[in-house]
Image (cartoon, rainbow, N blue to C red):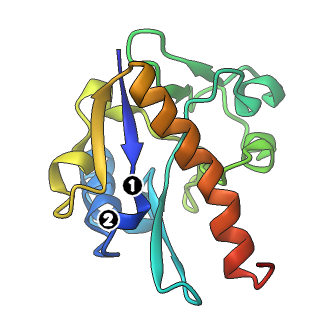
């Protein structure tokens, strides 16, 4: 089983991941329809790609009243059944990483589906900030370190540290 790893320190902010994600899923270059978003932390002069962390106990799945969000055990991605999704946004508010997005046109939820095991964002990332790696103890350590780093970056960005 593989998972997406994000190294924010390597991100240049080119936003190719957002653009190509929307192109892959919707056939249009519309970064707002991407399932990955790059956030710029002005004070730090840093870009942070935000994407589903595929939590062990995903809050998005737990709070969904229609069970529209669930884990695809073939790819390990969190999947959204758009026919069941009612657009209540419970999963958006429950995600501790801000990695659940909304399609403004449909009101439905967008989550990274790992492109069915072949993530487009990884292929187009020119700096290697995005990688798709086999899950191992080393990769688990990277995931936890990256997850722990996000709140620290947020805190710095809002002037708390």
In the picture of the structure, the residue carrying the numbered disc 2 is 10
Residue 44, relative to residue 71: is it above or below? below
In the picture of the structure, the residue carrying the numbered disc 1 is 7
In the rendered image, which quarter is residue 62 located in?
A: top right
Residue 121 in sight here: yes
Q: Quadrant of the C terminus?
A: bottom right
Residue at x-position 27% and y-position 66%: 29
The circle drawn on residue 107 is none
Residue 67, relative to residue 151: is it above or below? above
For the residues labelled 2 and 1, the Cα–Cα distance comes to 6 Å
Q: Position of residue 87 (x, y in %)?
A: 72, 44
Residue at x-position 34% and y-position 67%: 11
25 or 155: which is nearer to us? 155
Q: Residues within 10 Å of mark 1 (few under 14, many from 20)?
A: some
Mark 2 touches mark 1? (CB < 8 Å) = yes
In the rendered view, does 139 fall on the left or right side of 65? left
Residue 110 in sight here: no
In the rendered image, which quarter is residue 158 located in?
A: bottom right
Element under disc 1: loop
Residue 136, relative to residue 141: is it above or below? above
Residue at x-position 81% and y-position 42%: 90
In the rendered image, which quarter is residue 13 located in?
A: bottom left
């Amino acid at each position: 089983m593989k998972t997406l790893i994000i190294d924010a320190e390597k991100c240049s902010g080119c936003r190719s991941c957002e653009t190509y994600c929307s192109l892959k899923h919707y056939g249009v270059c519309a970064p707002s329809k991407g399932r990955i978003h790059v956030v710029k932390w002005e004070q730090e002069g840093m870009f942070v790609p935000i994407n589903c962390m595929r939590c062990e106990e995903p809050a998005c799945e737990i709070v969904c009243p229609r069970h529209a969000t669930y884990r695809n055990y073939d790819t390990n991605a969190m999947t959204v059944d758009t026919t069941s999704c009612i657009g209540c946004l419970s999963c958006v508010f429950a995600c501790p990483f801000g990695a659940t997005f909304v399609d403004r046109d449909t009101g439905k939820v967008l989550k990274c589906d790992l492109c069915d095991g072949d993530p487009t964002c990884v292929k187009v990332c020119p700096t290697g900030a995005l990688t798709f790696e086999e899950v191992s103890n080393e990769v688990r350590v990277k995931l936890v370190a990256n997850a722990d780093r996000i709140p620290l970056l947020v805190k710095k960005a809002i002037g708390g540290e």
